[in-house]
Image (tube, rainbow, N blue to C red):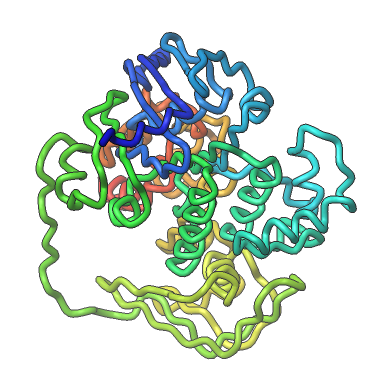
């Protein structure tokens, strides 16, 4: 009895090369994706995953190599051409206009002209079918990052993709939202849609994906069936060596550093959440988690703690024993408060600015701005120190923030700033 024939590949990449002035992002990469397959592209930050996906989607042109679609060599010169082939992509950093509604954002991304009012029913139908409820009339700025991701996915699904690329899709999702996303992706795969899933989260890869291609330093270091692997074996393929086990010595929490006392804050946003009589203490040497499904007040609490929202309220916020309710973000930073937002680009860093220039934005406390004058040399030295300390994969401190993957230098800089002060 003859074995069943293998399913012909939908996408084949052969010898893909992409060079930049200071780095080779993709070094002769081969990849095969079949219909109905959830295929992981696994690797550390800076391994070349996002660059490879942008090549498939037509955002970036390769310097060498061949792309085959349905068995035929193609040149994908633009995202519009990729969409015409049936390729959709949900980017790691969303491309939505915050002042527009969901329907208006979707209409802008469609290749065919459709009025937003006519799209509402289609958006609701597709979002409900795949378990991604979205209100087409809601303004985007009022949505959490998880909700915005739903908009991006629905926008792709409206174009009936045959290959869906997901670039770090769970980096902004709660665990509950991750499970919902996985259900959606499995349903799409069952309908014959191929999925390229980019991540470095090993548990997710093993739970979801059929096949994994592992990148390290822009090169393919192997392929695997994730369900047959362990986190240790996959990690070894990613980093090229055994991971060292981190052990934290036990210690007793010390003095109270941050205190929220009977804090109530009404929301101005019709889709926001009012904070009611919150009490919270964070001690020195303590890690405190705030858990909850997206939309239950986490965003409002963090905005109040960081100083982004200063409004009439009840109760008080104390930092190092000092009431800080009405202090600006800069004044709170001067006391030692650091805040890393969930939106890395656009809020945590300015995308087109260099890493050194991004360091200047909050650099007054570490001597990067003195008497109103920018210390350019000190900024570059400081940025280089962060790059070295956190092993950030980039050309140098003059690389722009939007050229990096998830490891944004400025988002990692709170410990480095502390060390810099001690120097």
Tell which of 24 and 276 is nearer to you: 24
305 displayed left or right of 393: right
Residue 388: image location, x then y, percent: 26, 34
The image shows a total of numbered marks equal to 0
Locate residue 133, reporting x and y percent: 66, 65
Tell me, yes or no, if residue 377 can be seen here.
yes
Q: Position of residue 54 (x, y in %)?
A: 51, 28
Q: Residue at x 58, y 75 (%)?
A: 297
Is residue 154 positioned above or below 276 on the image? above
Figure quadrant of residue 296: bottom right
Looking at this view, name the residue that lies furthest to the top. Answer: 64
Q: Is residue 131 above or below residue 392?
A: below
Quarter of the figure with the N terminus: top left
165 vs 95, left or right, is: left
The structure residue drawn at horizontal position 28% and vertical position 33%, both measured from the top left corner, is 2
Query: Would residue 367 be seen by someone viewing this image from the given angle?
Result: no
Quadrant of the rendered structure where residue 267 is?
bottom right
Q: Position of residue 8 (x, y in %)?
A: 43, 28
Residue at point 50%, 33% (across, down):
357
Residue 315 or residue 161, whichever sits in front: 161
Quarter of the image with the C terminus is top left
Residue sitting at x 38%, y 16%: 14
């Amino acid at each position: 009895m003859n074995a069943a024939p293998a399913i012909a590949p939908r996408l084949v990449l052969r010898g893909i090369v992409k060079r930049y002035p200071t780095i080779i992002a993709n070094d002769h990469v081969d990849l095969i994706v079949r219909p109905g397959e959830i295929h992981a592209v696994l690797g550390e930050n800076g391994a070349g995953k996002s660059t490879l996906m942008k090549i498939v989607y037509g955002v970036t042109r390769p310097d060498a190599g061949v792309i085959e679609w349905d068995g035929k060599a193609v040149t994908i010169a633009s995202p519009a051409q990729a969409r015409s082939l049936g390729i959709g992509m949900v980017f790691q950093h969303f491309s939505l206009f915050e002042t527009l509604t969901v329907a208006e954002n979707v209409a802008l991304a469609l290749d065919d002209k459709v009025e937003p009012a006519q799209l509402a029913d289609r958006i609701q139908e597709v979002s409900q079918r795949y378990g991604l409820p979205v209100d087409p009339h809601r303004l985007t700025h009022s949505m959490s990052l998880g909700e915005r991701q739903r908009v991006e996915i629905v926008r792709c699904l409206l174009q009936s993709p045959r290959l869906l690329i997901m670039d770090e899709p769970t980096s902004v999702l709660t665990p509950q939202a991750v499970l919902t996303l996985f259900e959606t992706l499995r349903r799409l795969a069952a309908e014959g849609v191929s999925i390229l899933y980019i991540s470095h989260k090993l548990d997710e890869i093993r739970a979801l994906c059929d096949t994994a291609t592992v990148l390290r330093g822009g090169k393919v270091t192997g392929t695997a069936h994730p369900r047959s692997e362990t986190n240790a074996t996959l990690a070894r393929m990613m980093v090229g060596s055994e991971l060292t086990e981190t052990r934290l010595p036990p210690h007793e929490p010390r003095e109270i550093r941050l205190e929220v006392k009977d804090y109530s804050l009404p929301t101005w946003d019709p889709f926001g959440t009012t904070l009611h009589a919150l009490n919270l203490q964070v001690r020195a040497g303590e890690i405190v988690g705030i858990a909850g499904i997206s939309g239950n007040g986490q965003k409002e609490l963090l905005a109040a703690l960081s100083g982004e929202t200063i409004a009439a309220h009840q109760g008080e916020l104390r930092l190092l024993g000092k009431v800080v309710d009405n202090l600006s973000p800069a004044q709170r930073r001067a006391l030692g408060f650091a805040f890393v937002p969930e939106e890395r680009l656009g809020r945590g860093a300015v995308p087109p600015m260099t890493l050194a220039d991004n360091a200047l934005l909050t650099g007054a406390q570490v001597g990067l701005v003195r008497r109103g004058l920018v210390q350019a040399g000190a900024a570059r030295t400081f940025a280089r120190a962060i790059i070295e300390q956190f092993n950030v994969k980039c050309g140098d401190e003059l690389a722009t923030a939007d050229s990096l993957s998830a490891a944004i230098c400025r988002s990692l800089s709170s410990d480095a700033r502390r060390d810099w002060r001690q120097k």
